[in-house]
Image (tube, rainbow, N blue to C red):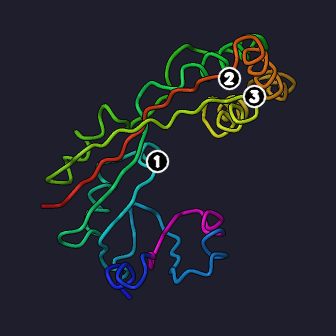
């Protein structure tokens, strides 16, 4: 069953792959007619064939050789098909980052006032993708949010390298690392109590790429 047939029949995908099997758990439970393949994104099995749409959602910046992987994924896009890659702006979410800086400094942990080291973002994405695709179009959108309490701010923070990097850094005192989360939450709630809901601005976008 091809992607084209599935789209015509009801808009479902018939294949999705990821190197981590647990990522597929919600899809397995969905009951949708989806084939699940666990593979390295840079070596997707040719047996899968080609697809109308290949989506790289916020993952290219994790790769060592972005261009090589994008070129490999291009081979999985059938003629007339589309490759879509989503990512963030190089600098964003400053209000959340300020809270991170304050939390780290209050615990005596080393911190640098610089953006996360991201290798694929809105500002350089087109140049990288044009090494594999003939046409690249960017659409930007605002993915920020307003937080009335500290909970949604910490939920987002906990999923970033800002939080994860010091938490797994065994050179840092374990006592300070364990206090990072409650300290961040306290500072976030303190700021909200003093100034009202916290606006976390975040610019994101999607690159739409075609082989021809």
On residue 197, the disc is: 2
The structure residue drawn at horizontal position 78% and vertical position 16%, both measured from the top left corner, is: 193
Graded by Cα atoms within 10 Å as few (under 14), some (14 to 19) or many (20 or more), the crowding at tag 1 reads some
Between the residue at mark 2 and the residue at mark 3, the CA separation in whole angstroms equals 9 Å
Graded by Cα atoms within 10 Å as few (under 14), some (14 to 19) or many (20 or more), the crowding at tag 3 reads many
Q: Nearer the viewer, residue 179 or 185?
A: 185
Q: Residue furthest bottom?
A: 1
Circle 2/circle 3 CB separation < 8 Å: no
Q: Nearer the viewer, residue 136 or 44?
A: 136
- The reply to whether the magenta stretch includes residue 19 is yes
* 10 relative position to 136: left or right: right
- The reply to whether the magenta stretch includes residue 204 is no
Task: Give the residue pinned by disc 3.
Answer: 150
Task: Give the residue pinned by disc 1.
Answer: 58
In this rendering, the answer to whether 22 lies above or below 178 is below
Residue range (magenta): 12-25
In this rendering, the answer to whether 123 lies above or below 46 is above
For the N terminus, the image quarter is bottom left
User: Which of pointers 1 and 2 lies earlier in the amino acid sequence?
Assistant: 1
Rendered image quadrant of residue 188: top right
């Amino acid at each position: 069953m091809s992607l084209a047939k599935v789209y015509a029949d009801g808009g479902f995908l018939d294949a999705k792959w990821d190197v981590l099997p647990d990522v597929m758990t919600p899809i397995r439970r969905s009951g949708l007619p989806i084939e699940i393949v666990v593979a390295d994104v840079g070596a997707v099995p040719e047996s899968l064939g080609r697809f109308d749409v290949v989506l790289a959602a916020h993952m290219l910046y994790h790769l060592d050789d972005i261009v090589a992987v994008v070129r490999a994924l291009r081979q999985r896009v059938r003629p007339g098909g589309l490759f879509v890659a989503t990512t963030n702006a190089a600098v964003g979410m400053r209000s959340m980052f300020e809270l991170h800086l304050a939390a780290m400094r209050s615990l005596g942990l080393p911190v640098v006032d610089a953006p996360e080291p991201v290798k694929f973002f809105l500002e350089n994405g087109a140049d990288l993708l044009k090494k594999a695709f003939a046409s690249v179009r960017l659409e930007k959108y605002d993915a920020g949010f307003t937080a009335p309490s500290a909970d949604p701010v910490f939920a987002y923070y906990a999923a970033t390298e800002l939080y994860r990097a010091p938490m797994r850094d065994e050179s840092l005192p374990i006592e300070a690392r364990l206090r990072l989360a409650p300290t961040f939450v306290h500072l976030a709630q303190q700021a909200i109590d003093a100034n009202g809901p916290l606006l976390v601005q975040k610019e994101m976008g999607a690159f739409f790429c075609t082989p021809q």
